[in-house]
Amino acid sequence: MVTTHHFLIVDDDPIFTAVAESVIRSTGPHHTSVASDGQDGLKRLSEANPPVDVVLLDLNMPKLDGLAYLRELGDRGYRGAVIISSGESKSIIEAARQLGRMLGVEICGTLEKPLRRETFLAELENCEACLRKASEPVLASGMSAAMQGQIVPYFQPQIAPRDGHLVGLEALVRLRTADGRVLGPPAVFHPGIRDADLPRLTLSIADLAMAEAARWRASGHERRISINLDARTLDAANFQANLLALVEKHGLEPQSVVFELTETALPKSLTGLIEQLTRIRMCGFGLSLDDYGTGTANYALLRLCPFSELKIDKSVVQSAVADRVSHLFFKTSISMAADLGMEVVAEGVETPEQLQMVVDAGISTVQGFIYTPAIPAELAFPKSCWRPESMRQTG
């Protein structure tokens, strides 16, 4: 069975374009679009139906050259294949290939001019492999699930401490290896993960977490879920639209999903961050400022962005029991959040003393090892209410 592709030829050489179209038609019932420069190529990429999954890209073009086009592909989160078709030197083509990789664009091959059918067929096979790889989940070092393992969501319950009621669940990324081990973030977020992989990884874990939430809802357990959001994902093309599509896919409401933002690796453009986070709130999603109290950008983010929830970091919670300054910061944070109409979650609660302090301060939601570490989805709804670990041991 022949796989049908939509080829976009971006090249200012009309002879190459005509030959390439002829060769593509000879290989199967493919769709073909042609652009004579990079600007036209971007326009046709946006308007293409069906979507373009293979780009034949020249490097030396007027208006917008191939290098700038690669950067645009990276910014748009393009996940198809790219074949560089250029008469430039091998060193220039290799530099372009390396640039593409750094931008998260899959350069699957190169074609010399004049184009030969046999060479094109060989590169088309490489494209098939690239496209199959792009459709697999992103894993620890960007390798396939068969080679590394499988990304799975674990959930840490968020509990109302006064009665043990389950308020919500935070989805946390885990890696289930081929031998059945479950590994935490150090293994999942391997140094090999590129910034360009983060939007796909975020959408992948959001998809899995929302699928679990839909199953809980179908069995009568409707709770909100929280999903971690790396700020670097917000520049990806259509990211908010993809989030809404996932909610619709699983039959959930945006109000039942909270995205937790940390200040680690914030994008350079603070105005862009404010715009994207505001748009997420306008879609109806909750927005939580995670790890509050750990960094210098916390206050600026809280002042500028429309957060609906404040998560006080475990370092603050744990030190506030004995340290006067930490305790004052802890109480001030709660008071400020109340004045701003925000929910408050205390995370990292591990001891009875910490739990009592949180309850006395009027915090209604707690997350931490005193109740449970992150657990598989099937364990999230016990038959009775959640109780602190010390009470389970004695009761």
Image (cartoon, rainbow, N blue to C red):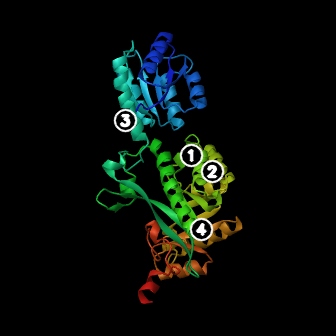
Q: Amino acid at mark 1?
A: Leu
Is tag 1's residue or tag 2's residue first in the polypeptide sequence?
1
The residue positioned 51% from the left and 17% from the top of the image is 61
141 with respect to 374 (left or right): left
Query: Which residue is disc 2 drawn over?
Result: 277
Q: Please state which amino acid type lies under the numbered disc 2.
A: Leu
Residue 140 image point, x, y percent = 37, 50
Residue appearing at x 45%, y 17% in the figure: 20
The residue positioned farthest toward the bottom in the image shown? 395
Task: Identify the residue under disc 4.
Answer: 222
Between the residue at mark 4 and the residue at mark 1, the CA separation in whole angstroms equals: 28 Å
Which amino acid does the dot numbered 3 rest on?
Ala
Q: Is residue 292 visible?
A: no
Report, in whole angstroms, how far the alpha carbon at label 3 lies from the one at label 1.
Answer: 28 Å
Against 11, residue 249 (above or below) is below
Sequence order check: which comes first, mark 2 or mark 4?
4
Q: Which residue is mark 1?
A: 234
| Residue 92, percent from left and from top | 38, 21
Q: Can the viewer see residue 383? A: yes
Q: Which mark is residue 129?
A: 3
Marks 1/2 in contact by CB < 8 Å: the verdict is: yes
